Amino acid sequence: MAVQPANRPKFSFQSKHSSAEISQFLAETHNNDLFFSLSYWELAAVGSTARDLLEFAGVKHEKLTPTFAEWSAGEVPTAFSVMPCLKVKGPNGMEFNMAESEVIDTFLAERFGLLGNNTWEAMTIRTFYTNMQYLRERTFTETLWVSDSEKKKARDQFLSYSLRKFLEDHEFHLQENGCNGHYVVVQLSLADLHLANIVHFYGTVPWAKMALDEFQKYEAVWKVKETVDRVTELDEWRASDEFKQYEKGSRDYYTKNCTVPEDVVAEKKEE
C-alpha cells in the first residue's frame, strides 16, 4: 500500500469491486436505495451546490462539516487534501468515494435528472456550469487573496470587468434561450441551480451589496436565480437554520481572513 502523507490521510479510488461492477451497481440501483455522505467546510462556497442537489432530490444523506482541529489532526480523509468529498453507500456493502466539486456536482445532477435529456443538452449544461466555476475562482484570486493595500482596487476592477463580462456573456445566452428562467430549453438543470448558488455565494462576501446590485442589472440572469429560489425543496432548504449557518460561516470566515476594503467598513459603521 502507498505511504500516506503526514496529517493528510487519503482515500483511494481503488476498490474490491471492478469498475464494471460499480457501473452496473449505479445503473441498477435506485437513488432511494443509496446513502450520500458529503464532507465540506461549514461554508457556503464550493461544496454548496452539492448540498443544494441533495436537498432538491430528497435522498438519504448527511452533510459532514469537519472542524479545523479535526483537519489539522489528520482526521479527515480526502483524495487531494481538499474538500468537498462524497461517499456513496448502497446495499450489500457497496460503497465508493468521489472527489472534486465539478465531478461530484455533475454526478449528482445526472442521478437526479438535472443534466438534460440528451448528449447535446448535457454538454451545454456542463459548459455553463464550468464557466460559473471559473468565475468563483477568479473571485478568490482577484479580490480576496490580494494584499491589503490592493483590496479596494482589486474589488472595483473585478466588479467592473470580470463580473460584468461574465454577466454580459450569460445574459446573451439566456436571452437566446428565451429569457425563461433556464439555461437549456425550459427545464431545470444543474446550470440553473449552480447560478443561483453562485448568487447566494456573493451574498456572503464583504462587498455583497455591490455584487448583488450588479447581478440584478441583468434581467435574464436574475430571472434564473428567482426561478430556482421558487423551487419548493430549495426554498425550504434556504429558509432552514442549517443553510443560514453555512452562510454565516462564510461571512465570518471572509471577515476574519480577508481584509475588508475601507469603504465597506465605513458603510457598515453607518448602518
Image (cartoon, rainbow, N blue to C red):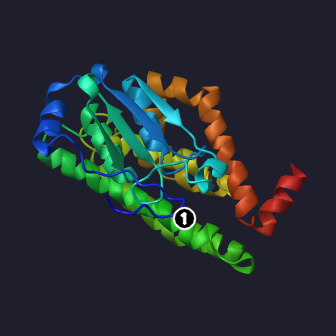
User: Is 160 situated above or below 124?
Assistant: below
Residue located beneath label 1 in the image: 139
Residue placed furthest toward the right = 270
Q: Answer left or right for 175 relative to 140.
A: left
Q: Is residue 224 visible?
A: no
Q: Which residue is depicted at the point 46% across and 22% down?
A: 232
Q: Is residue 269 visible?
A: yes
Q: Position of residue 250 (x, y in %)?
A: 65, 49
Q: Nearer the viewer, residue 51 or 198?
A: 51
User: Which residue type carries mark 1?
Assistant: Thr
How packed mark 1 is, by other alpha carbons closer than 10 Å (few <14, some 14-19, many 20 or more), is some
Q: Which residue is depicted at the point 48% across and 36% down?
A: 226
Q: Nearer the viewer, residue 3 or 255?
A: 3
Quadrant where the image shows the N terminus: bottom left
Q: Answer left or right for 207 relative to 54.
A: right
Q: Quadrant of residue 94?
A: top left
Q: Position of residue 248 (x, y in %)?
A: 69, 42
Q: Which residue is depicted at the point 12% across and 34% down?
A: 24
Q: Answer left or right for 249 relative to 79.
A: right
Q: Position of residue 244 (x, y in %)?
A: 64, 34
